Image (cartoon, helix red, strand yellow):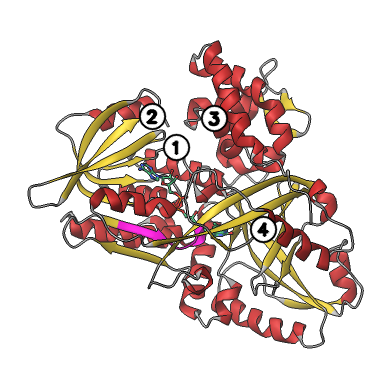
């Protein structure tokens, strides 16, 4: 991916794009891959970095949504399970199978949850995931060594997928580029261009790095800005908000909290939700919460009550005393839930997506859904966009399209495994003197990975490198802050930046990263 090349394409006068996409999260990137692979002329503009919004802040599960079964939403689960299988096939380097264990403390729980999970397996029939089974008390203890064994009766084990969300996003951006799309980060959409009849015919945009503004023309514009959808809808016309923003946070611990390759699933928390504690990279990610918030920003702020809630729930299930001192990092994301009525209670809103076309401006908006279903959402969005723009209909091919990085090589392991086919280039660069140097003793990030991110993955800031090209900030916030100066100087060499850029980058990143350090003390 080459940002300059994309910007030059966006600035070409006289060019009319078939589809212009606003937003570079799972939704927008999925649309870009789908539309470009159908042969349409596509551009995508992201105001910050790819996946800077919700798409880098998920629980990292590729799932049908066991809990939606309880709501009777069988078709949503069925579709998501189908997408789970598709993703595992098309991006096996970023998605893997994971075992989840539900511990049972009451006599009926294993039978009750086991029945639901057998239905889950039935809906997933024919795919590559093993089926669920009941576990004895000893099997649960051996699967989850820190589980509270007092009054434990047994449990149930089932399978879902696990992934690295930001890496999948970067791979989708690369795939879109390979299919011919022009994608650019740090390009903000500031307005919509309209015809005399009020139809959207293009967008006004600003290069955030240079503050230079431009316009481009497009036959149809897709608003894929997730929780920010209202701000783009406001550029179209004044209307009541449609997004009900709901925040979810995660706490990250070292593996001693759950020394296992298997995940813990708490089927019913005090507020009636589920909670996961999942091994991910070298850490355990625990979450999440569901808190109605008023504002949507790029760095949502975890609340004390949310941190307390996760710690309390974990302490109820674990045999060790987990406190805020054990937290290596805390991160928050905003669910782009689409309001169906005036109801403000987010638990009652559907996790399914909404897709619509404005009857006057013809702006197409896609919002809601899950990472797991991004491909199917994209297929529906491109079908609608092509119809709106009167493009020649072309079939969707993404069910069979390999995502960048897919490789048959099963020997790649360790911290480069998620790079898939790109790992070979990084390994080769690591042979050069100094390039295999880890930038921090507590982070698995080398000089070569930083260079690769700058040259091939459009990394522009320290935050891009430490939060999304690698997951250092989520894995260990303090270590990421300590590593920032080294990252900045490597990036400055790659991007031809001076000392003042380095100082400004370190200051900006330190402010962001402080928000990931857990400053809370338990009540
Ligand atoms: C706490 C939490 C946990 C979750 N866990 C899971 C999970 O385990 N599995 C799963 O399948 N799903 C999960 N989800 C859901 C999933 O993460 C989201 O559905 C998905 O990431 C939404 O992607 P998006 O592209 O719609 O939004 P975003 O990722 O937020 O992308 C929108 C993008 O638009 C950009 N943008 C906004 N305004 C402009 C503008 N004017 N110009 C240019 N760009 C703009 C933003 O910068 C942003 O990058 C979770 C969600 C949350 C909140």
Mark 2 touches mark 4? (CB < 8 Å): no
**Mark nearer the viewer, 2 or 4:** 4
Quarter occupied by residue 487: top right
Whether label 4 lies within 8 Å of ligand 1 gets the answer no
Of mark 2 and mark 4, the one earlier in the sequence is 2
Q: Which mark is residue 208?
A: 2
**Is residue 60 depicted above or below 264 in this figure?**
above
Taking the spot 67% from the left edge, 85% from the top edge, the residue there is 115
Q: Which residues are magenta?
A: 365-372
The residue at which mark 1 appears reads as 48
- The residue indicated by pointer 3 is 453
Few, some or many residues within 10 Å of mark 4 (<14, 14–19, 20+): many
In the rendered image, residue 368 lying in the magenta stretch gets the answer yes
* CB within 8 Å, label 3 to label 4: no
Q: Is mark 3 within 8 Å of ligand 1?
A: no
Q: CA distance from mark 2 to mark 4?
A: 33 Å
Q: Residue at x 17, y 29 (%)?
A: 13
Task: Identify the residue at horizontal 22%, vertical 56% (top origin).
Answer: 386
Say which element carries label 2.
Answer: loop
User: Along the polypeptide, which appears first: circle 1 or circle 4?
Assistant: 1
Residue behind label 1 places its C-beta within 8 angstroms of ligand 1: yes
Residue 486 in magenta stretch: no
How far from the left and from the top, in percent, is residue 493? 55, 14
Direction from residue 233 to residue 271 in the image, left or right: right
């Amino acid at each position: 991916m080459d940002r300059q090349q994309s910007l030059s394409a966006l600035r070409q006068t006289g060019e009319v794009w078939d589809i212009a996409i606003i937003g570079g999260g799972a939704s927008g990137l999925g649309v870009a891959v789908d539309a470009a692979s159908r042969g349409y002329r596509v551009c995508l503009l992201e105001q910050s970095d790819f996946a800077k919004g919700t798409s880098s802040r998920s629980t990292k599960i590729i799932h049908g949504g066991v809990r939606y079964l309880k709501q009777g939403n069988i078709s949503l689960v069925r579709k998501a399970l189908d997408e789970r299988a598709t993703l595992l096939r098309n991006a096996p380097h970023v998605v893997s199978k994971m075992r989840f264990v539900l511990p049972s403390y009451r006599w009926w729980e294993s039978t009750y949850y086991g029945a639901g999970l057998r239905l889950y397996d039935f809906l997933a029939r024919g795919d590559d995931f093993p089926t669920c089974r009941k576990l004895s008390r000893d099997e649960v203890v051996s699967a989850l060594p820190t589980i509270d064994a007092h009054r434990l009766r047994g449990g149930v084990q089932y399978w879902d997928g696990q992934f690295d969300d930001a890496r999948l996003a970067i791979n989708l951006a690369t795939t879109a580029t390979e299919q011919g799309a022009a994608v650019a980060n740090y390009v903000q959409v500031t307005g919509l261009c309209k015809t005399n009849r009020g139809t959207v015919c293009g967008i006004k945009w600003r290069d955030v790095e240079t503050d230079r503004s431009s316009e481009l023309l497009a036959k149809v514009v897709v608003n894929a800005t997730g929780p920010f959808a209202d701000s783009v809808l406001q550029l179209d016309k004044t209307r009541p908000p449609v997004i009900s923003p709901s925040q979810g946070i995660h706490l990250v611990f070292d593996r001693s909290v759950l020394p296992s390759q298997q995940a813990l699933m708490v089927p019913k928390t005090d507020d009636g939700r589920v909670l996961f504690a999942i091994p991910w990279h070298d850490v355990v990610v625990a979450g999440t919460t569901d808190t109605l918030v008023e504002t949507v920003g790029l760095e949502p702020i975890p609340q004390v009550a949310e941190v307390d809630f996760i710690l309390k729930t974990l302490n109820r299930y674990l045999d060790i005393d987990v406190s805020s001192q054990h937290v290596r990092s805390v991160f928050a994301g905003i669910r782009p839930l689409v309001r169906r009525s005036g109801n403000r209670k987010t638990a009652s809103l559907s996790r399914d997506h909404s897709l619509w076309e404005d009857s006057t401006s013809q702006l197409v908006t896609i919002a809601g859904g899950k990472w797991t279903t991004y491909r199917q959402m994209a297929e529906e969005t491109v079908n609608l966009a092509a119809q709106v723009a009167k493009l020649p209909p072309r079939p969707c091919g993404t069910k069979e399209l390999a995502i960048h990085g897919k490789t048959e090589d099963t020997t790649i392991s360790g911290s480069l495994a998620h790079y898939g086919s790109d790992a070979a280039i990084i390994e080769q660069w690591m042979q050069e003197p100094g390039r295999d140097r880890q930038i921090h003793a507590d982070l698995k990030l080398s000089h070569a990975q930083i260079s690769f991110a700058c040259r091939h993955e459009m990394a522009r800031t320290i935050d891009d490198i430490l939060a999304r090209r690698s997951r250092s900030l989520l894995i260990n916030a303090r270590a990421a802050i300590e590593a920032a100066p080294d990252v900045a100087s490597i990036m400055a060499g790659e991007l031809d930046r001076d000392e003042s850029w380095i100082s400004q980058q370190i200051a900006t990143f330190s402010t962001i990263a402080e928000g990931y350090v857990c400053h809370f003390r338990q009540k």
